[in-house]
Image (tube, grey):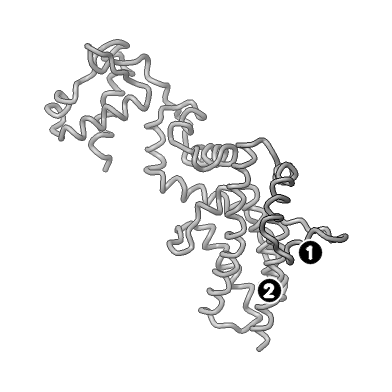
Amino acid sequence: MDAPYRRIVADIRRRIETGELRPGDRVPSARAITAEWGVAIATATKAHAALREAGLTVARPGVGTVVAGPAPPRDTDLTRDRIVAEAVAIAGRDGLAELSMRRIAAGLDVATMSLYRHVPSRDDLILAMIDAALGELRVPPRYSGDWRADLDRCARALWAVFQRHPWLGPSMSMTRPQPAPNALRLGEWMMGALDPTGLGVADRLLVQVLLFSFVRGVASGLEPEAQAVRDTGLTDEQWMDGQAGAFAAFAARHPAPHYEQLFQGDLDFEFDLQVLFEFGLARFLDGLAVWINR
């Protein structure tokens, strides 16, 4: 059942759309709402706030709350999938912190309150976004019989999804996993890839969780990096080049012979998340092979 304030908003919106309330007309005050709908003053205040957020009303000093103008047109084609797709686009372009129902509604040219008929809360929206992003992951329809090759292929496919959606890593929880169908599909595939090892189901689950945690952990750095590029307009390489003098002065004050070796001779060392992913994935699978072979 809809929350009481939503029913109030829906009724006042209907009055605006049918012309019963016209631009400039006063809408029922909070006190009038409590009398007409039999709700608490806090509920009436929440309804007023929702009407303002949807752009239906404005507060006029000395007059009260009035109709702001014609109600935003209803979008009969509005669906959960369209809302999620717009949310994913905003998060990918501007970061998860910039995502709001108001921005989604503006992008779809609909009233903000209309989104809640399809996505009840922000948590529901984030879960739907996670599931949509993981739904892009394509794993082979069949196993090769080589558990290491299959896990390697799956980890790389997952890494590619995280790279396309930098917001995805930080939005996921390992200790409180979100019930996303496509996350379950991924986990099931990874556990199945371990069939040739003879590992028990509990050990397979631990391997699957640890491998996912590794990829997701490295991917958690993608969103801050993307935000830094948006904030500074500089790539990581450009930023490092600009900090060369500062790092040289820092190194002079804090001698570190092992680090100094990285910059001596012909050693060409470049550290980025892709390097970390490649190194970490190989070492994870190396260690797993030793353990399985025992």
Q: In this orientation, which residue lies closer to the viewer: 169 or 204?
A: 169
Q: Quadrant of residue 40?
A: top left
* Comparing labels 1 and 2, the label whose residue is closer to the camera: 1
Residue 164, compared with residue 211, is above or below; it is above
Name the residue rendered at 68%, 67% in the picture: 281
Q: Quadrant of the N terminus?
A: top left
Residue 26, compared with residue 82, is above or below; it is above
Q: In which quarter of the image is residue 27?
A: top left
- Give left or right: position of 201 versus 271: left
Within-10-Å neighbours for mark 2: few <14, some 14–19, many 20+: some
Residue 63: image location, x then y, percent: 22, 12
Say what amino acid the circle numbered 2 marks: Leu
Q: How far apart are marks 1 and 2 (CA)?
A: 28 Å
Kindly identify which residue carries mark 2: 285
| Callout 1–callout 2 Cβ contact below 8 Å | no
Kindly identify which residue carries mark 1: 261
Residue 221, compared with residue 205, is above or below; it is above
Within-10-Å neighbours for mark 1: few <14, some 14–19, many 20+: few
Say what amino acid the circle numbered 1 marks: Gln
- Give left or right: position of 16 versus 152: left
Q: Quadrant of residue 39?
A: top left
Residue 245: image location, x then y, percent: 73, 45
Residue 190, compared with residue 92, is above or below; it is below
Residue at the far front in the pictured view: 253
Q: In this orientation, which residue lies closer to the viewer: 133 or 288?
A: 288
Residue 151: image location, x then y, percent: 67, 69
Residue 181: image location, x then y, percent: 50, 58
Q: Indicate which disc, 1 or 2, sits on the residue closer to the N terminus.
A: 1
Q: What element carries label 1?
A: helix
Q: Is mark 2 on a helix, strand or loop?
A: helix
Count of labels shown? 2
